[in-house]
Image (tube, helix red, strand yellow):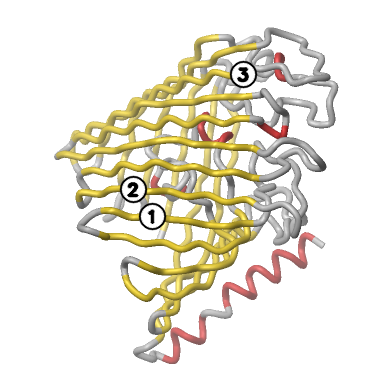
Amino acid sequence: MNKKLIAIAIGAALGAGPLTAQARSDIKVSWFGFTQITASYGELDFGNSNDGLRFGADRIRIGYKMKVGNAFGKLQVDFNRSNIANTTPLPEIIKDAEVGYKWSSAARVKAGIFKTPVGMDFNTSGKKLDITKRGMEKALVLERAVGVMLSGRKIGGGFGYDIGVFNPTVRSTVVSGGTTGTDSAWAARFMYDMGKMFHAEVYYGQSESAGGGTTADYEVWGLAAKWRSGPLTAKFEYISGSDLMGNAGLDQTVWYVHGGWRLNRQTELVIRHYQGERDGIPSGWTVSGASSADLRNTYVGVNFFLGPKDHNARIQLNYVFVGGDEATWYQSWNSSSTTAGRGGSARGYTEDGFLVQFQTSF
């Protein structure tokens, strides 16, 4: 089954090839792809006795973007997905599959599967991240889902918006249920941009019956900003999630601050500090640890850019310093309910470690 899905994904991607050969002025196709190979050293997770050197991969992707007049489309597949047979309703190997139409910069609509407009860092491409991994806030966003979204940019100079309606966002860490056709999800984001120098946004999202059945709706909101001036990059994001996995009263917040300093064209120093807090004991839970906990992850590192563009060839080195309730951050989320395990939200490293990523991209 998995081999068939991979073959279908490759065939769908290659289907764009003949359009390029036609050389028609009204059809524009651009291909992209990237590979990220990783290495790590240290325990990284509490109680992990395997603290040696480990190799792996984060993303192995290929895709295309297409324009036909005012219509557009995109396909992106990731061959590093382990659960590619999970059809919700599309296999997870398919990251994006969208079609759309643009009337103007102030109004365009697209349908398919794509990222919801929840999370500034989440909506940054995986090949353009400032650090080797997506951080603690990734656990609280509404993940990619099938739906329709209306967007606008450059309104009144720099304002923009995204408003979307989706199937239940079951690819999310914080959503395990919801019935398509009965339950739905929606999200909205409003932003302001001053060119490439400054960006600010606020967002809100909800996925109904987040644990399935008659469980509570998951709600999330956040605000974020980034600023670039000369060699300096600064970022901030705060995100808050309520009733995780449909468990009423189970809440979590995460915020981070980020700084980057470009020493020269090839080298950037970075530091990012995460703070996560969670609280609440849903009815019927058997708690094996504290009822609340906090965790801190601080990434200190350097990025080396080896190609004509930052993402063409890049090496990232990060050391992660950990603080807070390392021993209970995951343990205290255990429950005897149907949403057992980590409560569907806890994310972050609980032991210090060293991370490396080597990326090539076109």
Residue named by callout 2: 191
Task: Identify the amino acid type marked 1.
Answer: Tyr
Q: Front-most of 55 and 20? A: 20
Q: Residue at x 21, y 40 (%)?
A: 228
Distance in Å between CA atoms under marks 1 and 2: 6 Å
Residues packed near mark 2 inside 10 Å, few (<14), some (14 to 19) or many (20 plus): many
Q: Residue at x 59, y 19 (%)?
A: 278
- Say if mark 1 contacts mark 2, CB within 8 Å: yes
336 versus 197 height, above or below: above
User: Residue 272's spot in the image, x, y percent?
Assistant: 37, 26
**Where does the N terminus fall, quadrant-wise?**
bottom right
- Say if mark 2 contacts mark 3, CB within 8 Å: no
Task: Identify the amino acid type marked 2.
Answer: Met
Distance in Å between CA atoms under marks 2 and 3: 42 Å
Ranked by sequence position, the earlier of labels 1 and 2 is 1
User: Residue 199's spot in the image, x, y percent?
Assistant: 28, 44
Residue named by callout 3: 51
Ranked by sequence position, the earlier of labels 1 and 3 is 3
Q: Nearer the viewer, mark 2 or mark 3?
A: 2
Residue named by callout 1: 161
- Say if mark 1 contacts mark 3, CB within 8 Å: no
User: Residue 252's spot in the image, x, y percent?
Assistant: 57, 24
